[in-house]
C-alpha cells in the first residue's frame, strides 16, 4: 500500500508511524520548515520554549502507553495535576498534565524518526499528490482541507469544524518573581486565556511565562501578532503582580482551538481521509488517536 500523508502534525505523524509499522509505504508532506504542527517549540535565548500546545493529557490507555514510552526515553515527564483558575485565584486539581523537557516538538520528532518526511513541500490540490497512491490522508484543520478541493463526503466534515485563533506570547523576565504557579486558566478576561510557567513545566526553572490570548484579541491582531505581545505582557503582569518588563516573542495560530465537530475519529471519501484533533475533545491525545484509528482502518485491522 502506498499512502501520502499531507501534514506532519501529531495526527499525520501518528498515522504515518502506524502505517509504516504495518508495512505500508508512506510519504509525509508538509509545507513548513519544521514538523510537529502545534507541538511547537521555539528556540529563544538558547532554550526551547513551547509555543503551541501547553501540555499532554493521557487518559486513553493507548495514548498513555505512548506517553510512558516517551517517559522511558527521557522525552516526557509528569508535570502537574494542579492549575490555578482566575479571577478567583484558587488552585484546582485535575488529570496529570505531561510536559517535555526538550520541548513538545521532541515528541513529534520521535514519531517521525525513520519516516519519509518532505518539508517545504506545499500541496495545492489532492490530485497533485494522489497519482499512484492508494490513499491520501489530510492531517490538517478542516478549513485548510477545503482549500485542496476534497471529494464530496469530506466537505461537510471539514466545513462543520469551527476553529478559534490564538496568539502566544513568550515572556522572558530577568528573574523569577512568582511562586507556586504551574499554569492558569484565566476566565472572563478580555485578552488573556491561559498562562503557563515554562520553566516549571520544562523543569529548568527558567524565568519564562507563556501566555495565550483570547480568540477576540487574536482576531484583532492576526495580521500583526507582535502588536498583541505588549498587551498580553501587561495582562500577565497585572494578574501575577510582576513589575519587571519581559522580552517578548509572539506566534500566531490561525487554527488553534477546534470545537468538537464529530464523534467519529476521522472522515473518508474513497481514497481521501481527513483526521485531526477536531474529531473529539481538542487535545493532543485526540489528534494522535485520530491518526492511529485511520491507520488501522487503512490496514484493515
Image (cartoon, rainbow, N blue to C red):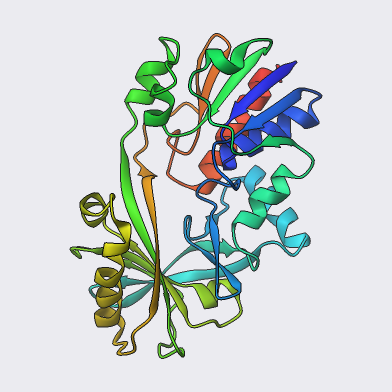
Q: Is residue 208 left or right of residue 220?
A: right
Q: Is residue 65 left or right of residue 81?
A: right
In the image, residue 61 sits, relative to residue 248, either above or below, namely: above
Q: Residue at x 62, y 27 (%)?
A: 5
Q: Residue at x 54, y 72 (%)?
A: 201
Q: Quadrant of the C terminus?
A: top right
Residue 278: x, y in percent? 42, 36
Closest to the observer: 213 or 82?
Answer: 213
Residue 104: x, y in percent? 59, 58
Residue 186 visible (yes or no): no
Q: Quadrant of the N terminus?
A: top right
Image quarter of residue 43: bottom right
In the image, residue 250 sits, relative to residue 129, either above or below, namely: below
Residue 29: x, y in percent? 62, 31
Residue 48 visible (yes or no): yes
In the image, residue 36 sits, relative to residue 56, either above or below, namely: above
Residue 192: x, y in percent? 27, 65
Image quarter of residue 218: bottom left
Q: Residue at x 72, y 28 (%)?
A: 19
Image quarter of residue 159: top left
In the image, residue 46 sits, relative to residue 291, either above or below, namely: below
Q: Residue at x 34, y 31 (%)?
A: 161
Q: How many marks?
A: 0
Amino acid at each position: 500500500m502506498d499512502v501520502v500523508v499531507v501534514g506532519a502534525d501529531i495526527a499525520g505523524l501518528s498515522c504515518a508511524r502506524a502505517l509504516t509499522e504495518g508495512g505500508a509505504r508512506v510519504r509525509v508532506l508538509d509545507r513548513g520548515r519544521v514538523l510537529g504542527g502545534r507541538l511547537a517549540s521555539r528556540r529563544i535565548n538558547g532554550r526551547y520554549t513551547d509555543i503551541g500546545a501547553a501540555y499532554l493529557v493521557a487518559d486513553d490507555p493507548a495514548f498513555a502507553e505512548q506517553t510512558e514510552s516517551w517517559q522511558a526515553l527521557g522525552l516526557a515527564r509528569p508535570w502537574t495535576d494542579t492549575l490555578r483558575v482566575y479571577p478567583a485565584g484558587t488552585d484546582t486539581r485535575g488529570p496529570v498534565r505531561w510536559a517535555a523537557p526538550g520541548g513538545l516538538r521532541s515528541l513529534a520528532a520521535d514519531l517521525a524518526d525513520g519516516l519519509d518526511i518532505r518539508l517545504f513541500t506545499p500541496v495545492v490540490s489532492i490530485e497533485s499528490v494522489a497519482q499512484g497512491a492508494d490513499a491520501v490522508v489530510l492531517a490538517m484543520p478542516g478549513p485548510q482541507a477545503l482549500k485542496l478541493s476534497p471529494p464530496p463526503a469530506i466537505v461537510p466534515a471539514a466545513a462543520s469544524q469551527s476553529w478559534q485563533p490564538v496568539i502566544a506570547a513568550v515572556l522572558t523576565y530577568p528573574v523569577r518573581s512568582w511562586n507556586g504557579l504551574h499554569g492558569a486558566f484565566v476566565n472572563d478576561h478580555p485578552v488573556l486565556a491561559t498562562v503557563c510557567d515554562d520553566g516549571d513545566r520544562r523543569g529548568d526553572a527558567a524565568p519564562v511565562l507563556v501566555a495565550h490570548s483570547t480568540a477576540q484579541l487574536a482576531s484583532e491582531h492576526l495580521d500583526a501578532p507582535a502588536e498583541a505581545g505588549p498587551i498580553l505582557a501587561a495582562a500577565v503582569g497585572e494578574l501575577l503582580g510582576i513589575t519587571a518588563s519581559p522580552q517578548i516573542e509572539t506566534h500566531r495560530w490561525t487554527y488553534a482551538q477546534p470545537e468538537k465537530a464529530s464523534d467519529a475519529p476521522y472522515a473518508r471519501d474513497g481514497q481521501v481521509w481527513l483526521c485531526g484533533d477536531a474529531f473529539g475533545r481538542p487535545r493532543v491525545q485526540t489528534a494522535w488517536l485520530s491518526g492511529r484509528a485511520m491507520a488501522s482502518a487503512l490496514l484493515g485491522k
